[in-house]
Image: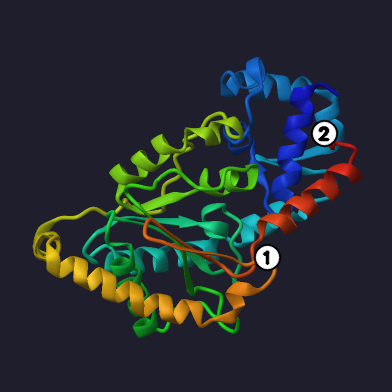
Amino acid sequence: MNAAEKAVLQLVVYYDLFEQTLSLYELWQLLPPLGAWNADFQAFVAAFQLSETLRERLTMCGDYVVLTGREQLIELRLSMAPVKHKLWRRAQWMTQIVRLIPFVRMVGVSGSLAQESAKADSDIDFFIIAQSGYIWWVRFWSKLILKLTRLDRSPRQTGGHFCYNHYVTTQSLRLDSQSEYVARLFCHLVPVYGFATYRDFCAANTWIALYVERFPVYHFPEFDILTDHGLPAAVKKGWEKMLRGKLGKKFEQWLKTVQLRRILSDDRRLSPGSQVVTEDDLLRFHLEAKEPLVAAHYAQRLAELGLNC
């Protein structure tokens, strides 16, 4: 088994952890640097088809590739298409509201929906970029909208509900954590609003190409990416102009104080594995961090299959 074959198998195993199957094209897009193997898609397909090792360990059905014995994942992905369509429509509807909040610069979908592995009980993860200096303002109004629409994710309500657990600003686009898990999470980020800011985000995180050579791998929603236009855009600009001075700074400081008081009163942030960050350019709320669990499970699966580094 050569290094390229091993990398392909490791990638299929990684996505198998999330019960996700990849098409041959998606597999090529998501590969780490492999030299001639993934110079272009045709070269990759040719090498893939000639590899006896890959033919022994992987099964290809139609456009999809899975570990042999895991063919049911293909049927699962296809059967979930109506569910994912419904979730995307709900994400579009919510983004149409959230984008009107002054100083929101981008709304992106991450997590299972972006990775094409969403199921009926999956929530919708939003990654929101705010104008620097107004992150607490943006979080307050976006969370208030969730409360008013009763679509805030909770332990008892997940499917089709929203989780706003990550905010950054235009001055902190480079991700603070840089690992394979984070790279693979954010290479799937789908911009729903604010494509120009999304491109700035990609430019600030070129390190992801160490794990995903073809980054940025542009993923787009089932609908046109939303933009600012017409009367709503004019009203938003008017509010931003009014709030850029001392009044806006006072509001930002007050909203920070109010929200921090509530956040710090939640003892769950002190639980083992919790990752809660409350900075003026980064807000992250992961009460049950998945990365350590995924890393451990991934290492175990690689060892079982004789693919560990």
Residue 290 location (% of width, % of height): 66, 60
Report which residue position mark 2 lands on: 309
State which quadrant residue 273 falls in: bottom right
Which of the two labelled residues, at mark 2 and mark 1, occupies the earlier sequence position?
Answer: 1
Residue 126 location (% of width, % of height): 44, 62
State which quadrant residue 247 falls in: bottom left
Horizontal relation, residue 172 to residue 196: left or right: right
Report which residue position mark 1 lands on: 273
Question: Is the residue 137 above or below the residue 8 in the image?
Answer: below
Q: Nearer the viewer, residue 309 or 5?
A: 309
- How far is disc 2 from disc 1 in space, using C-alphas? 26 Å
* Amino acid type of the residue that numbered disc 1 sits on in the rendered structure: Gly
Q: Residues within 10 Å of mark 1 (few under 14, many from 20)?
A: some
* Amino acid type of the residue that numbered disc 2 sits on in the rendered structure: Cys
The residue located at (64%, 68%) in the rendering is 288
Horizontal relation, residue 170 to residue 167: left or right: left
Q: Nearer the viewer, residue 301 or 200?
A: 200
Residue 102 shows in this picture: yes
Quadrant of image for the N terminus: top right
State which quadrant residue 297 falls in: bottom right
Residue 226 location (% of width, % of height): 28, 54
Horizontal relation, residue 26 to residue 301: left or right: left
Q: Nearer the viewer, residue 95 or 55?
A: 95
The residue located at (38%, 56%) in the rendering is 281
